[in-house]
Image (cartoon, helix red, strand yellow):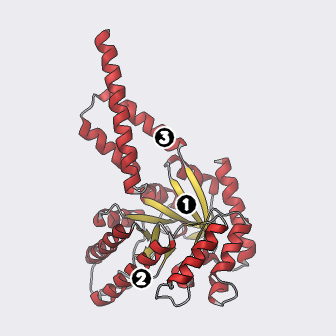
Amino acid sequence: MLFVYLQEIIAKLIVSFIKNQYKQQMKITYNMNRRKALKSALAASLLPFSLKELISEDDDSRQHNNHKFKISLNLYSFNKILQDDKADLFDMLEFCAKYNFDAIDPTGYYFPGYPEPPDITLINNFKKEAFILGLDISGTGIRNDFANPDAQARKRDINLIKKWIEAAAQLGSPNLRIFAGTHKHEGYSRDQVFEWMAKDIRTCCDYGKDLGVVIALQNHNDFLYTSADVNKIIEMVDSEWLGLNLDIGSYRKADPYEEIKKNIHHAVTWQIKENVWIDGNETPTDFNKLFKIIKEAGYRGYLPIETLGAGDPYIKVPKLLQQVTEAINRS
């Protein structure tokens, strides 16, 4: 009996050690591939089956209960108003504060002078005003096209991304949103495009690592159509500084909720939209179902919302915010 008792104590100590190591690793990897890290630790530990089972069950519990959401506004919701100079970034800060958003996601092309990054004075003023209003800057993003066979054009995009990584770091943005690309790449197979795309994205990730900015690749129904495409490119890049900006409205080939489940372990930020696509039709998002999936995955972090299409965003955004908030509380 004494031997069994001692074995149980040793097992608990080992569990505690592995969990502490796991928590430290998660701080480094910025909330990506959560379960993979623990399973790797388990495999390396060569623990008895019963102890592995104990940790696995505990991890399942953590995933179901340990979530933390911060609601952000992706400013593409106000795209036309911003492009027509009927409002500016500081007006958007006031709007977000009025409706008690946790954060704001100012896409790069709403800053004056895009594609060049804003000067440091504008960045500092924007960052100061956000701080005073109690708002985080949850992310920013730019346009690029890594599906383009022209290596020089892709190199220019890499250089642009590097400049905006620097701007993101100055803004205090934890990530920079990029795209795969839309180019038709005639004469080249998809596998060839995946190869050069992975290399280009890895170059950006390496630069992001140096400045503490995660590259958030958005699935945008462009070159990346499916969850399998997303998983493939992320695995090929193989960088802890790459994550997914999970766009729920851009899965058009299969059940979007099932696609989300297959990609959610890569998510570092989101685009939560009013509609998803089911059987070729734009359909109102089932937010109860969506947030149940997100909570069960144990996601922690920002949830930027975005409205599209016709209608006044000053009306549409508060409505979407209310739907999202109520669904979070229900699910």
Q: Nearer the viewer, mark 1 or mark 2?
A: 1
Label 2 amino acid? Asn
Residue picked out by circle 1: 302
The one nearer the camera, 223 or 76, is: 76
Residue 5 in picture, x, y percent from top left: 34, 15
The mark found on residue 137 in the picture is none
What is the CA distance from the residue labelled 1 to the residue labelled 2? 23 Å
What is the CA distance from the residue labelled 3 to the residue labelled 2? 37 Å
First along the sequence among labels 1 and 2: 2
- Tag 1 near tag 2, CB within 8 Å: no
What is the CA distance from the residue labelled 1 to the residue labelled 3? 19 Å
Quarter of the rendering containing residue 190: bottom left
The one nearer the camera, 193 or 51, is: 51
Task: Let me know if residue 167 appears in the view.
Answer: yes
Residue 241 in picture, x, y percent from top left: 36, 64
Name the side, left or right, on which 330 lies relative to 30. right
Label 3 amino acid? Arg
Instruction: Check disc 1: other Cα within 10 Å, few if <14, some if 14-19, many if 20+.
Output: many
Give the total number of marks visible in the rendering: 3
Name the side, left or right, on which 270 lies relative to 153. right
Residue 32 drawn above or below residue 284 = above
Q: Secondary structure at mark 3?
A: helix
Residue 266 in picture, x, y percent from top left: 42, 59
Quarter of the rendering containing residue 91: bottom right
Residue 67 drawn above or below residue 101 = above
Label 1 amino acid? Tyr
Residue picked out by circle 3: 62
Residue picked out by circle 2: 144
